[in-house]
């Protein structure tokens, strides 16, 4: 049985990497990007929202959209999948958690030192001078998903504040990518959870781990391009499979 095969790989492992994508947060109520009916990109145009050009063209549209998403994340809770990942740290000598997600649900579940490859909804910065900016105070009012909101101005240079996420065409944070690649080359098991593995360079991480000899375990209800390199495919939702795997 696949679950037992996965447990047998995890049991003796000395360094496990957990690599997550939007699917791990789906059962908390955070939409994924590419799921056919519920994914953000089925309702919104990625080019008009998740590129530097989009922010230049219409900063209020882009800032409003990310404010809507930040507040949505603040209203939801980590699920059993995030909690199982945090628990895994007590089962293996070394655990590295690498996420493509811009939410903070791994941290709120108790995973310390999470590597965020695509930034965070909670680290806005100046689009001109790059200095960090405060997360806006909650007004108690919930911005709706299509509402334009003017971004704040930088207190240092008066430039526009932008979300601290990585848009298409932008480089990933160098330290995060470097430490993720390093961990992938060193681990014995990489557990990939809830990612379509379509977005590069992040999608290289499980592939690097496989090339360097790690066993790859995948948790995803749908097939992905990682199926051929995964030693074990656990087809199902993360919030059910992970607690069964990490008891
Ligand atoms: C469940 C579940 C449940 C559902 N349980 N599972 C090589 C080839 C081709 C293109 C490129 C390439 N290299 C670079 C590119 C271009 C581009 C790219 O990859 N494009 C492809 C899409 C074709 N990459 C970039 O532009 C990157 N930058 C770059 O390469 O820069 C080069 C450079 C170097 C030096 C200087 C300057 C430039 C940047 C990529 C940034 C991606 N950003 C986003 C948005 C972040 C901000 C935001 O949140 O708005 O990141 S896009 C979006 O996709 C987001 C995600 O992190 C990322 C990955 O998505 P993820 O997590 O896999 O989600 P989904 O929805 O795709 O999948 C969900 C999965 O969960 C599904 O499989 C479901 O089945 C599953 N699931 N329910 C478990 N309950
Ligand atoms: Zn500034």
Image (cartoon, rainbow, N blue to C red):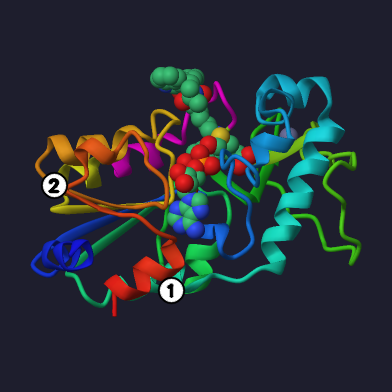
Question: Depth check: 150 or 109 in front?
Answer: 109
Ranked by sequence position, the earlier of labels 2 and 1 is: 1
Figure quadrant of residue 97: bottom left
Instruction: Please give the name of the residue rendered at 35% of the width and 68% of the height, measured from the top-left corner.
Output: 242
Is the residue 51 above or below the residue 64 in the image? above
Q: Which residue corresponds to mark 2?
A: 214
SS for callout 2: loop
Q: Considering depth in this image, is 99 or 157 the residue closer to the camera?
A: 99
Which quarter shows the N terminus?
bottom left
Q: Is residue 90 magenta-colored? A: no
Q: Indicate left or right for 215 with 202 as reference.
A: left
- Density class for disc 1 (Cα within 10 Å; few <14, some 14-19, many ≥20) is many
Q: Say if 17 sits above or below 33 in the image.
A: below
- Find out whether residue 177 is within the magenta segment: yes
Question: Which range of residues does the magenta coloring cover?
Answer: 167-180
Vertical relation: 149 (above or below) 51? below
Considering every residue shown, the one lying at the far front of the view is 1
Pointer 1: what residue?
83
> Within the image, what quadrant is residue 27 found in?
bottom right
């Amino acid at each position: 049985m696949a679950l037992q095969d996965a447990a047998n790989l995890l049991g003796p492992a000395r360094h496990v990497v957990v690599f997550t994508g939007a699917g791990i947060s789906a059962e908390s109520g955070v939409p994924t990007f590419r799921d056919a009916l519920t994914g953000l990109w089925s309702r919104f145009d990625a080019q008009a929202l998740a590129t530097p050009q989009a922010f230049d063209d219409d900063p209020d549209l882009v800032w409003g959209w990310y404010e809507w998403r930040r507040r949505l994340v603040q209203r939801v809770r980590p699920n059993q999948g995030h909690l199982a990942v945090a628990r895994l740290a007590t089962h293996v000598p070394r655990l590295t958690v690498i996420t493509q997600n811009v939410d903070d649900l791994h941290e709120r579940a108790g995973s310390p030192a999470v590597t965020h490859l695509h930034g965070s909804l909670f680290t806005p910065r100046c689009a001109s001078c790059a200095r960090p900016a405060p997360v806006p105070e909650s007004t108690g009012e919930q911005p709706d998903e299509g509402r334009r909101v003017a971004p704040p101005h930088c207190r240092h240079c008066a430039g526009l504040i932008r979300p601290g996420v990585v848009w298409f065409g932008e480089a990933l944070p160098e330290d995060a990518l470097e430490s993720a690649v390093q961990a992938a080359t060193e681990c014995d098991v990489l557990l990939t959870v809830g990612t379509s593995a379509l977005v590069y360079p992040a999608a290289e991480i499980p592939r690097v781990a496989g090339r360097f000899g790690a066993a790859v375990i995948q948790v995803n209800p749908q097939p992905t391009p990682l199926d051929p390199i995964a030693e074990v495919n656990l087809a199902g939702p993360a919030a059910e499979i992970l607690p069964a795997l990490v008891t």
